[in-house]
Every structure is written in C-alpha cells, then in structure tokens.
Image (cartoon, rainbow, N blue to C red):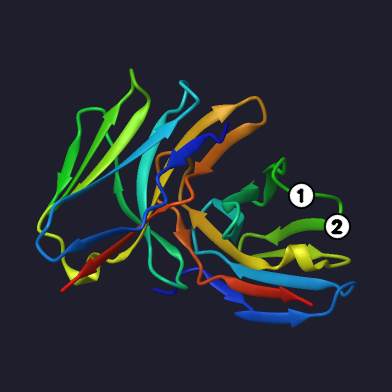
C-alpha cells in the first residue's frame, strides 16, 4: 500500500464551482502535512501547510483528520488559473530518517 | 533572489552513457533534496543532504545512482550507466530547515535515455 493515496482525477469543473480533494496516509506517526501545486511541465510549489486545527488561505481551505488519517483541500469559486495538479505531501520521521512522501497528485481542470 | 538552479534542463542520451545532473540550492538553505518524477510512480525522494552530509539515500534505486554535495552551493546526481527506465524528470529542492519548512524546487531536468 502506498504511503500517500490520492484520487488522480481528473476533476473537470466549471468556473465558480467548489471542488474538494482528499488524500489518505498510512503512517500514523506522520508529523507535517502540505498541499503543493504543480502546473504542467513545471516544478511543484507549496500551496499551503495543513494544520490540525484546519487553515484557510483565501479561496483555499485545508483540513487534517488525524484519527482517520486523511487530509482535504477545498477550493471555492474556482478560477481557470486553478487548473493544475495538486500534490498531497506527508512528512514524518522513520527508522531510515526523514521520510517524505508525495501523493501522485490530483489533476484539476477548470473550464469556462 | 535566485531560486534553485538546475542544469541541464533537458538531457537526451543513449543507454550506457554517464549522466550528471547539477543543482545549486538557495543560498543559506541547509537541506537539499533530489527527487525523480514519472507518470507511473509520481514524485519519489531519492536522497537528501543536511549541511552537505547525505542523511537518507534509501530512495536511490540502485548502485548506478550516486549523489554528492561537495559544498553548500553545489550538488550532483550521477547515473552510470544510464538505462531507458531512468527516463524521468529529476528535481532538486532545498529548504531552510526540515520537516516543517517549505521546500523550494528547481525547474527540473528532463532526462531521456534512448
């Protein structure tokens, strides 16, 4: 079983729609959680960190559920420029040291 | 400020050849990471360094892969000999601290092994 699982999509939504992505992780000792955004043929860039209490940044809201080991990302009022792949990232320490696991990403296409 | 710099941006080589990928992290960042991204496996951590010292290389696929960081401003990832299954985008990233800090990725090197 992969450490971090995401629905690959693609999610095709119209402009202005609300869309939510989920991500599950297998290591209950994981400590830090992030969402990265990756545009086509570009490098990943941090979108936001995910805190236990949940956090919001403009149209984006991230939630963490440690009991169920999942993370979510909600995008409200989606824009054409939101079209990208969203990578769930889970970090923690393991026997081999620093363990960094990326999901394979969820593809979002926002259409006019 | 300059971000993470990688070279070359594209590399096409023939099976059996040696390939060297280069990375210059953001000045002052203590951590440097090498990743590989493919459609099949997504983004995988190969190795990371802290203050130029390799900390975890458990993600390095096999002995054909090696990575060095001779100083704080330069790292290399070498594949010798290269194979077609090594074709991927290789990213270098750096961060100021570790698990709670943002990782800044370079633009990547797109490697094609024929």
The x, y position of residue B106, in whole percent, is 51, 68
Please state the horizontal and vertical placement of residue A25, each as a whole percent of the image: 45, 31
Q: Is disc 1 in contact with disc 2, using a CB cutoff of under 8 Å?
A: yes
Vertical position of residue B24 compared to residue B10: above or below: above
Instruction: Give me the C-alpha separation between circle 1 and circle 2.
Output: 8 Å
Q: In the image, is residue A19 above or below residue A98?
A: below
Q: Residues within 10 Å of mark 2 (few under 14, many from 20)?
A: few
Label at residue A110: none
Q: Residues within 10 Å of mark 1 (few under 14, many from 20)?
A: few
What residue does disc 2 label? B64
> Callout 2: helix, strand or loop?
loop
Query: Which label belongs to residue B61?
Result: 1
Residue visible at 47% across and 73% down?
A41
Which image quadrant for residue A7?
A: top left
Say which quadrant the C terminus of chain A sits in: bottom left
Parent chain of label 2: B
């Amino acid at each position: 079983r992969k450490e971090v699982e995401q629905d690959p999509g693609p999610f095709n939504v119209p402009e202005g729609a609300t869309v939510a992505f989920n991500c599950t992780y297998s290591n209950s000792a994981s400590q830090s959680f992030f969402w990265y955004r990756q545009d086509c043929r570009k490098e990943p860039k941090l979108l936001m960190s995910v805190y236990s209490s949940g956090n919001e940044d403009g149209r984006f809201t991230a939630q963490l559920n440690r009991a169920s080991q999942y993370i979510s990302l909600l995008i409200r009022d989606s824009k054409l420029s939101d079209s990208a792949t969203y990578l769930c990232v889970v970090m923690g320490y393991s026997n081999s040291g620093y363990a960094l696991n990326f999901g394979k990403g969820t593809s979002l296409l926002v259409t006019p | 400020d300059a971000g993470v710099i990688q070279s070359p941006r594209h590399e096409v080589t023939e099976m059996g050849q040696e390939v060297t990928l280069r990375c210059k992290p953001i000045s002052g960042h203590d951590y440097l990471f090498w990743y590989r991204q493919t459609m099949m496996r997504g983004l995988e951590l190969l190795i990371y360094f802290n203050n130029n010292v390799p900390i975890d290389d458990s993600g390095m696929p096999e002995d054909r892969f090696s990575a060095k960081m001779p100083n704080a401003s330069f790292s290399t990832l070498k594949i010798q000999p290269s194979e077609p299954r090594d074709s991927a985008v290789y990213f270098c990233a750096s961060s100021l601290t570790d698990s709670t800090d943002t990782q800044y990725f370079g633009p990547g090197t797109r490697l094609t092994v024929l």
